[in-house]
Every structure is written in C-alpha cells, then in structure tokens.
Amino acid sequence: MAGLTQAIRFCTSQDGLRIAYATMGRGRPLVRTAHFFTHVELDLNSPVWRPWLAELSRDRLLVRYDGRGCGLSDRSAAPLSLDAWLVDLEAVVDAAGLERFALFGCSQGAAVSVAYAARHPQRVSCLVLLGGYARGPMKREPTPAQVNEARVLLDLVQVGWGRDNPAFRQVFTSLFIPEGTPEQVNWFNELERLTTSPEDAARAIAAFGQLDVSEAAMRIACPTLVLHARGDARAPFEEGRRLAGLIPGARFVPLESRNHVLLEHEPAFARCFDEIHAFLDAHDAAPKHGPAFARLTPRERELLELLARGLDNLQIAAHLGLTEKTVRNKVSAVFDKLEVATRAQAIVAAREAGFGQAPLPR
C-alpha cells in the first residue's frame, strides 16, 4: 500500500457547488459513491480507509468523491437530499469522462447508488452494495423509543461534533468500528471532526433518515452484489437482506463482523473484497479489442490511447514528438480503421475497448 497515489480535481454540481473527486489506479473504472464524512485527501492515510482504497483500486481506476458539505467539497446551506446527492454523482462521472462503469456504494451511498443505477441503467455495468439499505431509519416504522434515540444522536452531534475532546464523537465511532484498534478509533474520531461541521453532520444524518429507494431497487437491471455484516450496529443486517430481496437477481453475502466499516485485520475484510473482486471480474471485465482494433499499428494504438484520454491534436503531437499535421493524418487513418466518422465516436469506441481509462499523470 506504500505506493498509493491519487489525483484530486474539482467539478461543479448542478446547483453550482464545487465537488472534490479523486482518481487512483489504472484499468476499468469503478466509481465509489460518497457516503457520510469522507475526505479524499485525508482518507488516503487513514488506517481505516487506506486498506479499502488499496483493494478498490487494485487493477482498476477508482473514482471517489466528497459529498456536498464534506471533505474538500463546498460546505453551504444547500439542500441535502437524494436528488442533491444524485446530481453530485452525475457531475463527478461526467467530469471524469466515464461512459460506463461499475458502481460501488456502502452505507448511505448504497441508496444513492441504487437510485443512480435505476435512473441511468445504460451507464452502470454492475453494482456492489456493502452495509447499505433501501430505507433510512425514519422510513422503517420506528418505535417511539427509536425516534427518541435518533433525536438524542442529533443533539450529540450539534453539541459535541466539533470539539477537540472526542467524547461525543466516540458514540458514533463505536457504532461504526466497535472492534477497532486504538489507532483506528483515534483516527476515526479525528476524521469525523475534520471532515464536516456539526451543522452539516446533523443535516446529513437527518436527511439519511428519510431515504427510501425501495421502488428504484426493484427496477435495477444490472448484476448486483449485496454484502452485509451480521452484527452491523449502524445499518441493521435485516435492512441489507431486505435490500438484496428488492433487487432482481441480486446475490447476498453475509459477513461475520460487528463493524459497519470493515477493518483490515478481521477475516470479514478479506472475505468481502475477495467476493467483490470475483464479482467485478465476472461482470465488468474489460472488453476484448475487436477486429478493427487489431488492424491498428502500435503507433496508432498509442495515439488512440491519448485520444481516449481527451487530448487534442496539439497535445498528442507534443506527447508523441510529431507535428500537428502528422497527428491529424494519423487520426484520420485511425477513424478509417475503426469505421467511425467523428472524434466523439472514436473516443467512445476506444473507451469501451479499454483505452484511456486512467487520467494522464500531472
């Protein structure tokens, strides 16, 4: 994991908020939907999240982002809702230039992923949901005691989330990683404080409680893998089982853990990511290059790789040490071999064949 590196960029959501996103790894794209208190910069060095990033970026281009109000994304009084989280995800995948990709959602991100996959079926090759649910706590016919507990948690957030003393945040940490090591617990406590404000944390928790994507789940058409820890204290196991039951053909994998966020040292972590890798390899394998691509020379394939990454002719010329006129002629030759008429068609064909999936290093 020592070699993990990433590139952080920004895009603009539909309502003008800047959303931070990061890319790492190479290969077919895997998009991780944002969930509660992420930080694309700090997560890379977290003893909790770094092992996740290593696994998710193994042989893949991992694209992840901070939701509105979190991490490096804009913090404002803009609404927090399913629609708002969807337009943030739409902005990120468009900015990253992704046409079709595997989608990974954990915790609250699972509901957003389900809604996105139902709305954009042509763009999601397959879906992985971990520790998620279709309906938030306030949509599960809560008892008066459960409603009161939710209010108490919101009060704790508003009173103590931003304090240097982690005592208040420890309540949430205990729900997320009850079996964490002292180092992991300390990191998680601090990450909560640095990731979002007390006001935004309270607004997010309240909005999560009102989620319900049950109807959207029944319209999912892509292969889906649902994983859930039996002892999850943050998202009940039965809600994960219910989510899998709503999605046609979904495969459900129970995990033996008490942690909502799986930790590297526990057996469930290895089991979880073995299942995820096998699922992605089966349902999101890179397409084999067809006969048209076989006709390309090595130099033309190199040019197509740069074309698929979004470079213009002048930039390609600089990378290959050619004149712009020579590049223009070679691009035309590539178009003829691929039987496409426009640059946009060539880029789509190239990306579907596995070209240009990782951004150029800066």
Image (cartoon, rainbow, N blue to C red):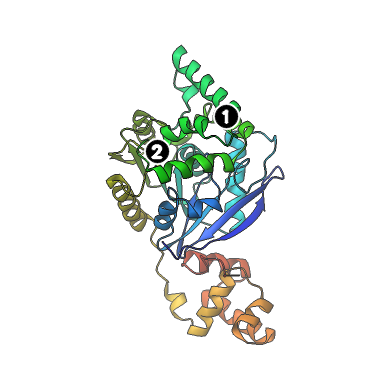
Q: Is residue 17 left or right of residue 50?
A: right
Q: Quadrant of residue 134?
A: top left
Q: Is residue 297 visible?
A: no
Whether residue 338 is situated above or below residue 77 in the rendered picture: below
For the residue pair 38 and 274, the one nearer the viewer reads as 38
Foreground label between 1 and 2: 1
**Residue positioned 50% across, 31% down in the render:** 167
**Residue positioned 53% across, 39% down in the render:** 192
Question: Residue farthest to the top?
Answer: 144
| The disc label shown at residue 296, or none | none
Q: To which residue does mark 1 refer?
A: 160
Q: Quadrant of residue 165?
A: top right
Q: To which residue does mark 2 refer?
A: 177
Question: Residue farthest to the right?
Answer: 16
Q: Amino acid at mark 1?
A: Gly
Q: Quadrant of residue 317?
A: bottom right
Q: Position of residue 143 (x, y in %)?
A: 44, 14
